[in-house]
Structure formats: structure tokens, C-alpha cells
Amino acid sequence: MIPDHPLQPHQENARDITKLDEAENFLYLLNTQNFDTKQQYIDRLAETNYDLLIIDLFFHANQPLTSEDIEKLSAKVNGGHRLLIAYMSIGEAEDYRYYWDRLWDLHPPLG
């Protein structure tokens, strides 16, 4: 969930952030269940001034973000540009992801 005061993150600034060590603040948001639509999610994140957004590449686990979504999220409201990091688990297959085959519940793939 985005904090109640998303436009004023800790150490808010209008600088362009081009490297991770330049970020003064960040928002880590992987769960999109509190948003009814992908557009609502994108708009809400775009309203913030966080230097870094750590988000899932998918909305509700099955709708990928587009290049237009990424472009919109790259700009902070105050005019600066932020970094985006897309989360992806490489340690497990997740049964709510687009790639999951329901047959794997009964017959897991060998690996």
C-alpha cells in the first residue's frame, strides 16, 4: 500500500536519479490487490516523488506493464526522473503467475 502522504517521501527532492546510490527514498510495492485497475495503479504511483520504485512487472500477476506505463512511472511529479526496479522471483515458481500450469499442482515438473 502506498503511504498516506506519497507526495512527501522522506528526503524528497527533484533531482534526476540515474544511479541507485543517488536515491534518497524508495517505495517497495509488490502487491497490487488494493487497486481495481492497472490504470489506477499506474496513476497512483505516478503521483509520487519517490526516487526509486521497486514494483512487480505485472499488475495482478497477469497484466504486464507496457513501455508507456514505464515511461509514465519514470517521471516524478516534481519534475525529476526516478529509477524503477522490477521484482522477479528467481528462487521459486509462483502459482499465481501467468506461466503457472494448473496441472503442476498434481504433477510438478521435474527440476
Image (cartoon, rainbow, N blue to C red):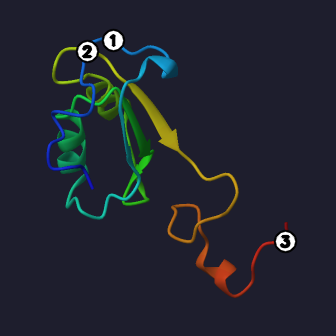
Residue type at the position of mark 2: Gly
Mark 1 is surrounded, within 10 Å at the Cα level, by few (under 14), some (14 to 19) or many (20 or more) other residues, namely some
Secondary element type, mark 1: loop
Q: In the image, which is nearer the foreground, mark 2 or mark 3? A: 2
SS assignment at label 3: loop
Q: Is residue 38 left or right of residue 18?
A: left
Q: For the residues marked 1 and 2, what is the alpha-carbon distance in whole angstroms?
A: 5 Å
Check whether the beta carbons of the residues at disc 1 and disc 2 lie within 8 A of each other.
yes
- Quadrant including the C terminus: bottom right
The residue under label 2 is 80
Counting every numbered tag in the picture gives: 3
Ranked by sequence position, the earlier of labels 3 and 1 is 1
Left or right position of 67 against 90: left
Identify the amino acid type marked 3.
Leu
Q: Position of residue 80 (x, y in %)?
A: 26, 15
Residue on which disc 1 sits: 16
Residue shown at 52% from the left, 63% from the top = 97
Q: Are marks 2 and 3 in contact (CB under 8 Å)?
A: no
Q: CA distance from mark 2 to mark 3?
A: 47 Å
Residue 3: where, in percent of width, then height? 22, 49
Whichever of labels 1 and 2 marks the residue nearer the N terminus, that label is 1
Task: Tell me where residue 23 appears, x and y as whole percent.
Answer: 41, 23
User: Crowdedness of circle 2 by 10 Å Cα count: few (<14), some, many (20+)?
Assistant: some
Instruction: Give the mark nearest the N terminus, 2 or 3.
Output: 2
Residue to which mark 3 is pinned? 110
Q: Give the quadrant of the N terminus.
A: bottom left
Residue occupying image coordinates x 24% and y 40%: 45
Residue 90, position as x, y percentages in the image: 68, 51
* Helix, strand or loop under label 2: loop
Few, some or many residues within 10 Å of mark 3 (<14, 14–19, 20+): few
Instruction: Give the residue drawn at x 23%, y 28%.
Output: 49
